[in-house]
Amino acid sequence: SDMSEYKTSVLGLDADSKSRILSFKDKAPVPKGDTVNNLQVLYSASTTSRRKNKNTTKLVSRHIPSAPSRILDAPDLLDDYYLNLLSWSDTNVLAVALSQAVYLWNAETGDIDELCNVEDEGPDAHISSVSWIQEGGGHLAVGTSWGQTMLWDVRAKKQLRKMNGHSDRVGALSWNRHVLSSGGRDNLIINHDVRIAEHKVANLASHTQEVCGLAWSPDGMTLASGANDNKLCLWDAAASSTSRPRYELTEHQAAVKALAWSPHERNLLATGGGTADRCIKFWNAQSGSMLQSVDTGSQVCALQWNPHEKEILSSHGFAKNQLCLWKYPTMAKVKELEGHTARVLHMAASPNGSSVVSAAADETLRFWDVFAPPCKSSGSKRGASDFPRGAKSKKLSRTMHIR
């Protein structure tokens, strides 16, 4: 009949069986890593943004400027989600890796120095990660595209040692006192004790794809690792090469790069997922339980806690390339900071905790006075614009090149 022909040709229905001809027998597989249809994300991002927050109560009492306090050009900053190319020392020096070189920008004086360059290693060689030692700001760890981890004495501008162990690029680094953990595209995490000649003290193998996020907890008891296998692992500080993680957490649906431990609550960890996931998740690292999950509407590239208030800042990719400030634990959105024209891959906080620098694939660094320090007294209104000491004396009205 005409109706059965119509059903077959237009609706994809078999007139006899009444079942769909094109039907999934099994659920579609979850995509691995950080790949997804951008149109899908744009649609979900636009729908979530239309849901207005009915609660118009002011969430913070301080003024948060919408514009960056300064912008630095960062030519050749690699547009690679899996690298970690920015680190700010407690002595107020910002390290940034621009392709084959590491540059140091002194936030007090505005001076820029080139620390090292790997062009001798070949045209494709590049710096894949940087991380300052926690205290004293004297030493910088530098991960490379050929799997080596270098340790530099910054004041002497001298390379102290090269540490091997990875067979592919080192995209993530994190310090725990004298132990430096490195994560590679070889799926491995290596703990190096930088005080001793036989530096490799543990080989941690649990991830099945590139390790792109590493973060030691403030108490030094737990190492969090995230990778392109969508997995978050929590490791005991005493882990050896035969150890399994304390927990393997598989709730994220995309690469886990953004990791941030709360400075306010012990064992509270925030993690962010890539394009197919878009969520910020909060975990109790002791029990392994997920406390909450928030869909942000776009790829989460980096996370940074406010040291002065219970707030967390996230940086994003497609479609808005923005930074978002959230109240914790309500996750009410306090502010969106826009201006970057490509995904905001990295963030780092100033040593006094009032400013955050973001680095994006648009090859700029932007400084935001987003975290106000607590007032010294009720009569004092010390703003984030006081940061950094001395830097404002040389006010930049123009964009400054980092090299």
Image (cartoon, rainbow, N blue to C red):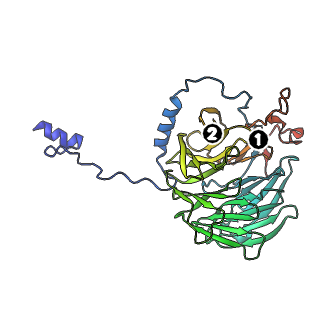
Q: Quadrant of the N terminus?
A: top left
Q: Is residue 18 left or right of residue 270?
A: left
Q: Nearer the viewer, mark 1 or mark 2?
A: 1
The structure residue drawn at horizontal position 77% and vertical position 43%, both measured from the top left corner, is 353
Q: Which mark is residue 214?
A: none
SS assignment at label 1: loop
Q: CA distance from mark 1 to mark 2?
A: 16 Å
Q: Is residue 133 left or right of residue 37?
A: right
The structure residue drawn at horizontal position 83% and vertical position 29%, both measured from the top left corner, is 381
Q: How many marks?
A: 2
Outermost residue toward the left?
1
- In this view, 6 is above or below 218: above
Where does the image place residue 340, in percent across and percent down from the top left? 66, 41
Q: Amino acid at mark 2?
A: Gln
Where does the image place residue 123, in percent across and percent down from the top left? 67, 67
Q: Is residue 97 visible?
A: yes
The image quarter in which residue 220 lies: bottom right
Q: Amino acid at mark 1?
A: Ser
The residue tagged 1 is 355
Q: Is residue 385 left or right of residue 341?
A: right
Where does the image place residue 223, in percent across and percent down from the top left? 64, 59
